[in-house]
Each structure stands twice: as C-alpha cells, then as structure tokens.
Image (cartoon, grey):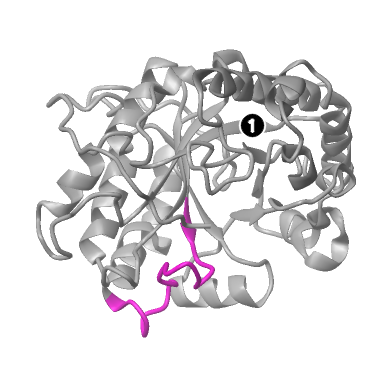
Amino acid sequence: MVPVALLAATILLAQATPGVLPASAAAPARPPAGAVAAGDTKTACIYVDPGAGLRQAERATGLTYRCLEVFVTGSSTWSAWANPWITHPQYGYRAWLTASPGPRTLVIATNLVPNDAVRQPGWRARCAAGEDARYARQLARNLVSAGYGGSVIRLGPEMNGEWEVDWIGPTVATERSWAGCFARIVTAMRSAPGARFLFDWNVNAGYQPIPLLRYYPGDAYVDIVGIDAYDEAPHPLPPVGSPDRWSVLVSERLGLLEVAAFATAHHKPLSIPEWGTMSTNGDDGAYVTAMARFVATHVVAYQAWYDADNNHVYPLQANVAPRSFAAYVAAFGPRQGAQHEQQGSG
C-alpha cells in the first residue's frame, strides 16, 4: 500500500502550527476509549489481520487494540465491490468487532469504483452524475447488515497518486469530477438504514502538491481529513538520526502541517490512516517519537501503524526494528493508553 513517491517540492510553512490544541482549551468529553469519532479521539489503530497477526502485535506492544484497519481495495466488479469479503464471518472481523473490551472500530479502505469501471472513459463524470449510486447503497446495506454500520470509510485513499486506479486524474476537470463522485457515493451510503459511517478523505503525503480544494468534495461529505505519512519523501532527506529529518518531513509541501491546517480550516479532525518507518531508510525511532508528539498536540481522530510487514514498512517487532518498536511502545503503550482514558473521562 505504500507507494514510491516521485516528485514534490519542500517548503517551510508559517511558524505557527495550525490545528495545535491551545494549552488553555478545556478538554471536551471524549467518546468511550476505542471508539473513533469525528473529533479529537486519538484512537490507536493498527493494520493487521484479526487473527495471528493481531495476537502477535498485542503480545509485543502490550496493547489491546480496539481499532483495526482493513483494505477491500482491488475489487474487479461492481458485485465484488458492493459485497466485500470482510462481510463474511470466516475472516474474523465480525467476531473481533463484538468482542470485549469494547467499543471497537473498523477502518475500511475501499476504492471509489471497481477496477472494471475505471477502464471505461469518463468514469469519474458518470459517477459524479449519480450513475453508480445504486451500488454504493448496496455496499452500505451489506456493511450495516454485517455489523459494520459505524465504521470509518477511507473512500478512495491516496487519491493524489496515480498508482491508485481510482486516482483524481491528470486534469482539473477529472479532479473535480472525482470530488463529485466521492460526494455522490457518500450521499448514497448515508441513505442506508442504520448507517453511521464516518468518511475519511485521505491524501498521500508529499506527492503532487495540487491545491487540495480542487479535489475536495466539500465539508458536507467529509467527516475526517486523512494523510498517509511514512518516514520517506519524494525528495532528499537528512539521514536517519538527524534532528532535521522530522522538520523537513512535517513541513514538506502536502505534509502533515499543511494537511492539518487544511483540516482545521474545514473544522475536521485529522487522521493518519497509514504510517510507519521504512526498512529502506533505517530504524528511525526519532520519527516515531515525533509522530507521537504531533498526534498529542493536534486534533487527531485516529492513527494506524501499517503492521503488515510488507512494502518495506517495519513491523512492530523488537527484534526487527528495536528503535521504532521501543519508541512506539513508549508513546502508545498500555501506560499511555490508560492516561489517555483518564484524561478523556475527567
């Protein structure tokens, strides 16, 4: 899921950090721990299967994850797109969602349309006109029926990268049609009885610094603004271990600071649906510590470590990436989670 980024320019943003929580602000009441809401819930999620992979991650970190991420991208047909495999009980997501402790949240990444549809010229415009809405309603009904009606939906994630088959496209016209398609699908899915979905509009950090408003569907159709932010960039970086590395990454064009500022301007919480350190760069515990500090000081609905042990992302294993692992446990481990729950209930 992690792309190899190509080109982007690095800029420094203003000294002020938009989206940072003011020290004097009274903390609002939080939803129950584990629930992701369209607010500052700061839920720790993980991308891993709900069986052996999750058990290994929980043993290693000491955490009991109440938020799992899953990808149902890559469907070839509308039938497969509207009937994702996770709705079948043998894959374990239903059982995990209803287990204790709760509540629990599933974050589901899905393409805007299936692969067959993107082969048709003008698919974005047709979707924006509502021609595919019936499939979106069917998807929503199937998710609700499976018990996933309160899930976060990452709809068309990393849309600014052409490695995604359903990307925004090469022109202003295709970008605007893509945004219209997103809005149509959200509207259709929300119409399903029992639907309580949160929709995450999710860019990839540092790639194609196109003005976000050109493909933003509008505040009415977005609950969370997301950014996938790995320890890599489409431009040279200071080496792992340099105190300047994080500063360059966070301040890059279409980086964490810029997208957080955009989220704040639109009164949306931020999410970091995919992040981690890269084996191609080296075990970067400082990146993990800095990311934890960023999450703590910004309005963040959830963050999810990509723990699939592929695409060159380090798994959360002390024997593989000891610095990243130790920094993650120090920042998000059981003690920190308990403190977060106490703050939310105070």
Above or below, 62 against 139 in this view is below
| Magenta span | 304-322
Q: Which of 147 and 223 is in front in this view?
A: 223
**210 with respect to 146 (left or right):** left
Question: Is 318 inside the magenta-drawn segment?
Answer: yes
Residue 194 in sight in this render: no
Residue designated by label 1: 198
Kindly state the secondary structure of the residue where label 1 is placed.
strand
Q: Could you say where residue 266 lies in the image, as x and y percent from the top left?
A: 44, 16
The residue carrying pointer 1 sits among few (fewer than 14), some (14 to 19) or many (20 or more) residues within 10 Å by Cα, namely many
- For the question of whether residue 224 can be seen, the reply is yes
Q: Which residue is drawn at 15% across and 24% down?
A: 14
Q: Residue furthest left?
A: 243
Task: Tell me the residue at 70%/20% (across/down).
Answer: 125
Q: Is residue 89 above or below residue 130?
A: below
Question: Left of 85 or right of it: where is 36?
Answer: left
The amino acid type found where label 1 is placed reads Leu
- List x then y, in percent, for residue 177: 63, 20
Q: Quick one: quadrant of the C terminus?
A: top left
Q: Residue furthest bottom?
A: 319
333 and 169: which is toward the camera: 169
Residue 49 located within the stretch drawn in magenta:
no
Q: Is residue 137 above or below residue 50?
A: above
Residue at the spot x=68%, y=66% of the render?
Answer: 50
Magenta: main secondary structure equals loop
| Residue 132 image point, x, y percent | 83, 27
The front one of 206 and 324 is: 206
